[in-house]
Image: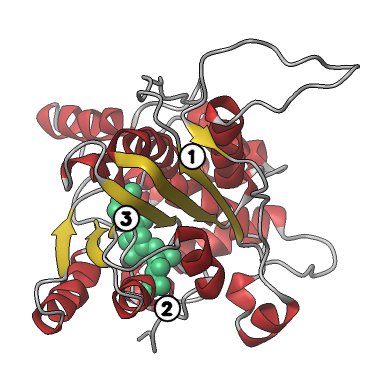
Amino acid sequence: MSTGHIPVLLPEVLEALAPLQDAAVIDGTFGGGGYSRALLAAGARVTGIDRDPQAVARGQELAGQAAGRFVMVEDTFSRLDSVLEPGTAAGVVLDVGVSSYQIDTAERGFSFQKEGPLDMRMGADGPSAADVVAQLTEAELTRLFQVYGEEREARRIARAIVQDRAATPFTTTLELAGLVSRVAGRGPPGPIHPATRVFQALRIYVNDELGELQLALAAAERVLAPGGRLVVVAFHSLEDRIVKGFLAERGQQGPGSRHMPAVAGPAPTFDTAGRKAVPPSDAEVAANPRARSARLRSAIRTEVPARSRPVNRPEGVPPLDEVSRRIVRKVRTGGG
Ligand SMILES: C[S@@+](CC[C@H](N)C(=O)[O-])C[C@H]1O[C@@H](n2cnc3c(N)ncnc32)[C@H](O)[C@@H]1O
């Protein structure tokens, strides 16, 4: 069982969201409530969102203690603009990824070091990691491990999974971690476990993490009032790239230079001037190694109306609902 979640970059998050007195803030990733509690203590009114029913139960407890200044909503953060009127939020904060509660609870199936069901769903529905490993073709699994895991041995791992699952389906974390170690774990032991990237890829896919993030950034643009703050803490480069790209696209254009004159584009919906990516301090990393790869990015909403934005999804990896359709089709045709 987990002993709790230590909030990452908390003073930096509060500073980037300031001023907070009486501000209406959406905490799109409630988790253990570390940010929400600090926001309440700083005088904000907070709406917490989480897709995980266990996090929602923690949030409901907090709502009971917060004298009408905190509301907990069970939902995905891609819909964070449904909890307040458009153009009214003073702040939106996202701390994307999994909580220590989730990773440390073996039954949730996130950890390749603890035996549990091969699940990895943050929410209560949708296909599990076991479903994905059972349903995707060898080519799709290869692409999944390449794109979401940046795994060099993707092809060999996918081939071994497809061979082995014909005899026995993968149902537990250690069965899959064992296969990956066997196929990709040759050579001297390195600093990271051989199954790290495969587990990361499955987790990202099962929870549509990158699609959710792209949708949430666009939703934040709609829900924030002019002057409102957007703050995102990301933990790996795939997420951070999305946040960085969004803010570059939507952010205040620089004045240009002799070599690269400013190009007239659509008016910026966010002001990013003077706001750089913030890493954790050495002291924070020493106290909480899980903060190691965190990066905070923030921006201030301008008065320019929100724009629409398509979600980019990689080619060669089927949409998540295709996994559910394949399961239904197999059951109907008696294929298991
Ligand atoms: C890193 S934790 C947040 C920790 C929190 N800031 C704290 O200090 O306690 C991330 C949380 O976001 C939730 N989450 C991740 N993706 C989500 C999504 N797309 N929609 C809603 N909640 C999500 C997870 O269930 C998890 O509880």
Q: Quadrant of residue 108?
A: bottom left
- 93 lies above or below 140: below
Disc 3, ligand 1: is the CB inside 8 Å? yes
**Residue at horizontal 54 percent and vertical 50 percent from the top:** 298
- 201 lies above or below 270: below
Give the number of the mark in front: 1 or 3. Answer: 3
**Residue at horizontal 38 percent and vertical 71 percent from the top:** 35
Label 2 SS: helix
Query: Number of callouts in the render?
Result: 3
Give the number of the mark in front: 3 or 2. Answer: 3
| Nearer-the-camera pick, 21 or 235 | 21
| Nearer-the-camera pick, 218 or 152 | 218
Label located before the other in sequence (1 or 3): 3
Cα separation, mark 3 vs mark 2, equals 21 Å
How packed is label 1: few (under 14 Cα within 10 Å), some, or many (20 or more)? some
The disc labelled 2 sits on which kind of residue? Asp
Would you name the residue on which mark 2 appears?
Answer: 104
Label 1 SS: helix
Observer able to see residue 215: yes
Could you tell whether 328 is left or right of 226 in the image? left
**Residue at horizontal 39 percent and vertical 26 percent from the top:** 318
What label does residue 28 carry, if any? Answer: 3
Counting from the top left corner in percent of width and height, residue 60 is at 13, 74
Would you name the residue on which mark 1 appears?
Answer: 162
